[in-house]
Amino acid sequence: MKGATQCKLPQSAWITDRQLIAKQSMRGMAKNVFQVHGITADGTVAFNRSLRRAQMFTFFQKLEPCLIGMEACGSSHYWARELSKLGHVVKLIAPVYVKPYVKRGKSDAADAEAICEAVTRPTMRFVEVKSPKQQAILSIHRARDLIVRQRTQTINMLRGLLAEFGIIFAQGVGHAVRFAKRAHEGYMPDLPQAACDVIVDLSEQVLTLHARVNWYGRRTAVAARSEPRMALLETIPGIGPITASAIVATVGSGEQFRSGRDLSAWLGLTPINKSTGGKERLGRISKMGDLYIRRLMVVGMTSRMKQIRENPERFDPWFADILQRKPAKLAAIAMANKTARIIWAVLSRNEPYMERTV
């Protein structure tokens, strides 16, 4: 974990009274050894040492309230909340923004020093500290995503083994679940007994994982009903309870973004700008943001395209036009990009979405 500290004057003017960097080593005894780096107001290095986990609170309790910068990583949100309770101001920095400040080599001490430098930059972008409730909702999403991947792996294994015997069923989770139910009930093709035993076992695993995915889906829907901002996002076409809860749990109110384009860029949905010499050159999307949310949004827009093609007069003319001019995948990305800006507007205004129709 990495960080930096800075004191605050009564006049609300920030000064560098003491800057502290706390860096959690991700190597060796990961999450058990922390590297701290501190400098004084004139830039003199006050300390650069390692701490054990048990020493963390005692060390920070002895410091006067200051600005703490940490690299956004595993458990960083927990430490940010705990250190804030001690009177410190905590800022989380994405690792990609810390790397340019590493002078030479790669070590815990060098990384901690780099964070100390990065956290004081006036234009630095910080990660919003998540609340326990946000992280609880995200835990549902992380677990659901794991179960979905395990279900996909099991279905692929089942399809591959059956293909060896010339048995093919249609692609899609629904077809796989139906085959698994028939196999569980005893309707098996004429195969050697050893193969039948494997097919039955994999079929039962598919059914179990499918039930777990549905359970997590219901848990997500319950969480969405408990948060007003999630209900607001669900008024946006193509945004369901899973996507809405993931967005609110990750970005909160969206106040850290100045505009809808900033949110879209954070999700990696905006094209890469390689302009020079007054010539604007835009490439593919950056894919630099949250992969999970971006995937949910693109899947949602892909599903929505079928509705737009069937009844284009019921939707914003922009969507119908983009479907006519662009291939399906490019259109889904463009629609997700536009929807991300709508999401920011809904969150910032705290109002439901009102779709424009012809």
Image (cartoon, rainbow, N blue to C red):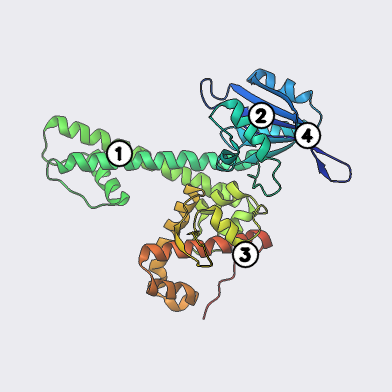
Taking 67 as reference, is 28 left or right?
left
Indicate the secondary structure of the residue bearing disc 2.
strand
Mark nearer the N terminus (1 vs 3): 1
Q: Is residue 185 visible?
A: no
Q: Residues within 10 Å of mark 3 (few under 14, many from 20)?
A: some
Instruction: Name above or below for residue 153 compared with residue 347.
Output: above
Q: Position of residue 320 (x, y in %)?
A: 43, 74
Indicate the secondary structure of the residue bearing disc 3.
loop
Dividing the picture into quarters, in which one does residue 113 lie?
A: top right
**Residue kind at label 3, given as amino acid type:** Pro
Q: Which residue is mark 4?
A: 66
**Residue kind at label 4, given as amino acid type:** Cys
Dividing the picture into quarters, in which one does residue 180 lie?
A: top left
Residue ID at (55%, 42%): 96
Label 1, label 3: how far apart the Cα atoms are = 40 Å
The tag on residue 352 is 3
**Residue kind at label 1, given as amino acid type:** Thr
Q: Position of residue 137 (x, y in %)?
A: 57, 43
Mark nearer the N terminus (4 vs 1): 4
Instruction: Name above or below for residue 323 compared with residue 103.
Output: below
Indicate the secondary structure of the residue bearing disc 4.
loop
Residue ID at (21%, 50%): 169
